[in-house]
Image (tube, helix red, strand yellow):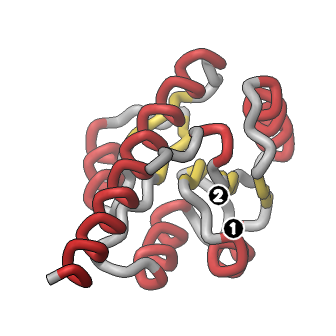
């Protein structure tokens, strides 16, 4: 069975700073990612998640109104327990307690602002490879369950 290319992945970007969204969209586009949805309104993140069913979420942590922690809680409630949904936190806040809280809330990795293009792309690629491997194993388990 063929594994999807990481550039075919659906990526959701949630950041209240339009300049960050534009920068991430350009970085992704230049690397061949074409299936990207973005919002600067954290209140729209859950609806976009439901409609778009992303393979990966790039999420700002500190946003007005609904912060990244609240968005992660919303996404967690919409994601089946056995699903691996990689969330990469976008933040300039490198305090250990913030990182621990984000990891406990479901984040899988961090990208520190300002972004380093190569680092962003490598972190995205690594987590997407893990996501696709998880999906492949799930499909395999279903097929084996049907065969018995």
Quarter occupied by the C terminus: bottom left
Tag 1 residue:
42
Horizontal and vertical percent position of residue 53: 62, 70
The residue lying toward the viewer, choosing from 21 and 99, is 21
Up-down relation of residue 120 to residue 145 (above or below): above
Q: Which mark is residue 63?
A: 2
SS at mark 2?
A: loop
Horizontal and vertical percent position of residue 1: 44, 50
Up-down relation of residue 118 to residue 38 (above or below): above
Looking at the image, which residue sits at the far left?
Answer: 148
Mark 1–mark 2 Cα distance, whole angstroms, equals 7 Å
- Write the residue at 36% across / 49% down: 133
Horizontal and vertical percent position of residue 86: 44, 53
SS at mark 1?
A: helix
Verify CB contact (< 8 Å) between mark 1 and mark 2.
Answer: yes
Task: Place residue 67 in its image quadrant.
Answer: bottom right
Are there few (<14), some (14-19), or many (20+) residues within 10 Å of tag 1? Answer: many
- Write the residue at 33% across / 63% down: 105
On the picture, is 132 further left or further right than 59?
A: left
Looking at the image, which residue sits at the far front?
Answer: 147
Horizontal and vertical percent position of residue 41: 77, 66
The residue lying toward the viewer, choosing from 6 and 51, is 6
- Write the residue at 61% across / 62% down: 54
Up-down relation of residue 32 to residue 44 (above or below): above
């Amino acid at each position: 069975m063929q594994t999807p290319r990481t550039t075919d992945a659906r990526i959701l970007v949630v950041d209240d700073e339009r300049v960050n969204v534009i920068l991430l969209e350009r970085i992704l586009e230049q690397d061949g990612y074409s299936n990207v949805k973005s919002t600067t309104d954290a209140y729209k993140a859950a609806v976009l998640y439901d409609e778009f069913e992303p393979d990966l979420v790039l999420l700002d942590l500190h946003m007005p109104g609904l912060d990244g922690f609240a968005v992660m809680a919303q996404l967690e409630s919409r994601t089946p327990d056995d699903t691996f949904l990689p969330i990469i936190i976008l933040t300039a806040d490198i305090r250990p307690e913030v990182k621990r809280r984000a990891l406990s809330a479901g984040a899988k990795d961090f990208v520190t602002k300002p972004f380093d293009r190569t680092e962003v792309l490598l972190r995205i690629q690594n987590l997407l490879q893990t996501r696709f491997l998880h999906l492949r194993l799930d499909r395999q388990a279903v097929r084996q369950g049907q065969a018995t």
